[in-house]
Amino acid sequence: NFLTEACEYTNSFLSFKPSIEIILNIEEDHMDFFKDINDIRNSFIKYVNLLPEDGLLVINGDIDNVEEIYAQAVCKVVTVGKTSSSDYTATDISYDSCGRCSYTLIYKGAPECTVSLGVAGLHNVYNSLAAIAVARHMGLSYDTILPGISNFTGTERRFQKKGMVNGITIIDDYAHHPDEIAATISTAEKYPHKKLTVIFQPHTYTRTKAFLNDFAKTLSRADRIILADIYAARETDTLGISSEDICRLIKEYGTECIYEPDFDRIPTLIKELCSDGDLVITMGAGNIVEVGETLINNP
């Protein structure tokens, strides 16, 4: 057995033969491949139908019209989410000084135990529900599960603390979709800081064009935004889109925003603008992580 993160891009996840699936969300993305959200949903339906009769689907019950996704499933289905109708949900959610949550785990309407997370962010409450649902299906007891949940301190490039520079905390995060950005900024809002500066590197021209307004609205929640050029990845610029377009829209929300086309100058810009007690997040799926690493290595 092995565990992997599957991706819907080019329908690559349909090549797997899974025995257990976790579906956390179904959102518009990879619009250079998919036609629309219904096209994406149809791919997820096909993905669910790969599961055998003795398999397990754990799915976010808050997904729109979620029943449609597993209507043809022959396996056991378990829902997790915010609504009380989900099999697993959470109540009494509280935060510690670093934004890590504790909550009461509810299973089929009844309280089971208290769960304490070792990672920050409300979204990780619902991620942990999915992990717990799988672990319970596999026969693990809460005595085994709960220490594992609390001792898990995260993965690389997911709200990962890289270090401190002149009293400035440097965090790195892989977020490159508006919903991921929103989750990361919400996490940062519960994390100790004076001002929040997000250094964002958009990923691909098609994604930037598709979510231009959503990027601007979500990023404007930070105190300051510094925008790097778009990371092209697999694409070439044929759409006439630029980080400058996001910058203009963010400024319309009244948030300080700087477009910096010189990637190598961004660490210097951070040192000029940020001060002791501030929080800086380098954000994106490209090479933006190098900015924080350069800062730390050359304070």
Image: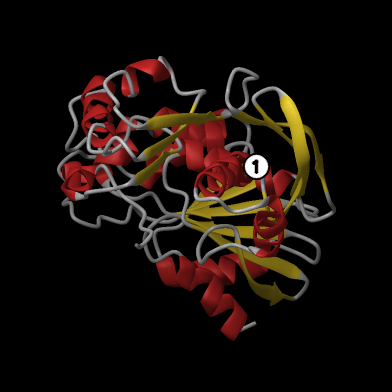
Is 15 displayed left or right of 90 in the figure?
left
Above or below, 110 relative to 275: above
Q: Looking at the figure, which quarter contains the N terminus?
A: bottom left
Front residue of 109 and 104: 109
For the question of whether residue 75 can be seen, the reply is yes
Name the residue beneath numbered marker 1.
125
Q: Looking at the figure, which quarter contains the C terminus?
A: bottom right
Residue at image coords 67%, 46%: 121
Colouring = secondary structure
Type of the residue with mark 1 = Val
Residue at image coords 43%, 29%: 77
Q: Secondary structure at mark 1?
A: helix
Q: Residue 118 location, x and y as percent? A: 70, 59
Q: Residue 242 location, x and y as percent? A: 32, 44
Above or below, 261 relative to 65: below
Front residue of 281 and 245: 281
**Dot 1 alpha-carbon crowd within 10 angstroms: few under 14, some 14 to 19, many 20 or more:** many
Residue at image coords 49%, 36%: 179
